[in-house]
Amino acid sequence: MRINYKRELEDAARTMILVHKPNTLIRLILRMIVRKVRVEHAGILLYEKSRDCFIVTITRGQIGSKIPAGLVRLDKHSPIIRFFNDSNNFPLLERGALLLSKINAILSDRDFFSGKEELEKLIIAIKFQMKSFDTVVCVPAYYRDNLLGILMLGEKVNKKTFKREELDFFNALANDVAMALRNAFLFEDLQLEIERNRKLFLETTMALSAAIDAKDHYTRGHTMRVTEYSLAMCRYIIADSSKNLDAKFLDDLHVASLLHDVGKIGVPEAILCKKGELTDEERKKINEHCVIGAMILEPIKALDEVILGVKYHHERFDGSGYPEGLKGEAIPYIASIISVADSYDAMTTDRPYRGAFTKDQAMVEIERCAGTQFNPYLVRVLAALYKRGEL
Amino acid sequence: MRINYKRELEDAARTMILVHKPNTLIRLILRMIVRKVRVEHAGILLYEKSRDCFIVTITRGQIGSKIPAGLVRLDKHSPIIRFFNDSNNFPLLERGALLLSKINAILSDRDFFSGKEELEKLIIAIKFQMKSFDTVVCVPAYYRDNLLGILMLGEKVNKKTFKREELDFFNALANDVAMALRNAFLFEDLQLEIERNRKLFLETTMALSAAIDAKDHYTRGHTMRVTEYSLAMCRYIIADSSKNLDAKFLDDLHVASLLHDVGKIGVPEAILCKKGELTDEERKKINEHCVIGAMILEPIKALDEVILGVKYHHERFDGSGYPEGLKGEAIPYIASIISVADSYDAMTTDRPYRGAFTKDQAMVEIERCAGTQFNPYLVRVLAALYKRGEL
């Protein structure tokens, strides 16, 4: 069966542009080479910036014949890399590729290397290297004069030599690979930056919340624990699939849990840290922390959902909570989740006016308040997590 | 001159994969069509998700002949869009393209539309629409059955009809365009997400700093102003190019300025808000805010440089500052900048123990302290900004 290489190449280019995971892309290309051209194995030496060397990343082919992935590492002093990094050597390439058969031919040509001992040494070293990898063709992939990778191919299954059009195919493919790889790497960089930024945002929010926490001796570590419980509840609810919560809701809940008590920064220390019982007036001041927190975050458009969690996490299911006395499903769901997590943590830690409940006692108390203080479904979620030992 | 369309197409595909700005990409493609195929004008109707309609985004060609960009908007009820969204109509395409000549031919064929009045009406409407755009060929660009755009081409400059290979070229190009566009849009989305996240991070940090600011009546708005002055100084220094500051430094300085007083959260309110003169003991407590701030942020790896700004913004050039008595160039540069900005704002606002200086007075005072309290170069930077009226 003849292969339409031009067509294969066009198809490959079109597929490549859509693949943004470098490893997926390389797997795809190598599989194609092994199947279409029927070589015994194919691998790719890929440049890794962080280590400044080339590593055999992925290989395809029969077990036993293929180069083991990850084990082979070549730095810039390695013969093959030196060869491809020096454009003086390019006349030795056959249609862009370095062939073992060509190497054998010039090594048996007595005149070829006269006065070029350095080159002869290099070529001998390359021959040794290619043989150790069981490789008969190396095809370089450049992006703007930078060597990004090298395709390394074993013999054809039928043991015949490679045809001109096959070499052209490899060469064009290698260049497309270089560009697709660069594209994929750029995508990966952007995605990593997004993750880094998100992490920075969460860590900074966490550090500042913990600092606010620390003002109130009795709530040390409270924010971290509430966040942990809220997220566990949310993941349970998503898995339970009876509610339609998405990744965005989980992200918002994460931030809202971290910031739920941020308004305490606006409550006078004298009240916040008072040892004895609070007066009605003082209690009122403390209760203002929900509204103060919402006011602090109010200018931030992207935190709309988060603000609902901060503002309403002291509402109660029966409408007897604050600041607005919202009832049942009218309470934003994000706030209802934080409310349960917040109360569970408050009960299981020491407070100025009482010692901590055991976890068992806290669960009994929370279940007793299902339908009055808490959303009954969320109490069931907390109970399920507790039974699983996840609290 | 004959054109090697296959080659042009390959080149185009390879260029496209590297262009990540949709508009740049489209300009490139349209310019190529106008030049290589020599059409009078070429434009692209691009799908815009936010408005759920197709808009003529960019056009190329002689002024007067080309479709005005931005003015033409087609929603999904528009004849051309309806035509390409219904695969039942595809047999009417010539090699993927809808030709005005084909439309004219079938409209003059008496039998063609018998029993298909709806289609006839649609085709007549399309003819009218194409004529109003001075367009003779429409080539749809699909990505996975979704219509992403339509190439709209004017007549050839030589007034001849389009050849088969030209139509094949347009069609292949349109599909490549669709994929490259999708790629470019994905890039754009990621970049927008990075910007959104950065904005969220800065806004949240700003809101929390402002809340901490608010604890100390006399420093209301202080953080925002210090941040503004620091960034103005840094931009001046970058433009002055005598120092090697990069965008990363500017970003770090931004965050460090916002957080420079974050440690005040750890200073008792009774001291922070005291109206009368402070005792030595109380002064010492307040001075701890630099170290407390650094401690709060310490767990955050990505804020290493920021923490230097927070910790050392009360060091003095002559070594008489705190917390470590660092001297001259040993003081982290980020901290030296904040120090000048911080002092300038402190002087120009009321404090419990004195009224505000005028800006003039503050500049005189700061220049007097060049070399003792402040880095002399940075004082010159502040003075230059002041002279320009930028403070």
Image (spheres, coloured by chain):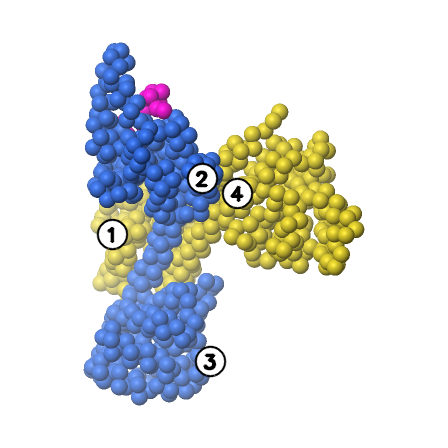
Chain colours: A blue, B yellow
Q: CA distance from mark 2 to mark 4?
A: 15 Å
CA gap, disc 3 to disc 1? Answer: 53 Å
Residues under labels 4 and 1: Cα distance?
62 Å
Q: Please check the rendered image and state whether residue A88 is part of the magenta-colored stretch, yes or no.
A: yes
Cβ–Cβ under 8 Å for marks 4 and 3: no
Amino acid under disc 1:
Tyr
Q: On the image, numbered disc 3 is attached to which residue? A: A330
B371 to A191, vertically: above or below: above
Q: Quadrant of the N terminus of chain B?
A: top right
* Marks 4 and 1, the one that precedes in the sequence: 4
Graded by Cα atoms within 10 Å as few (under 14), some (14 to 19) or many (20 or more), the crowding at tag 4 reads many
Where does the image place residue A23, in percent across and percent down from the top left?
A: 34, 46
- Numbered circle sitting on residue B322: 1
Q: Are marks 3 and 1 on the same chain?
A: no
Packing grade of label 3 (10 A; few <14, some 14-19, many >=20) is: few
The chain carrying label 4 is: B
Instruction: Name the N-terminal-most of marks 2 and 3.
Output: 2
Q: Residues within 10 Å of mark 1 (few under 14, many from 20)?
A: some
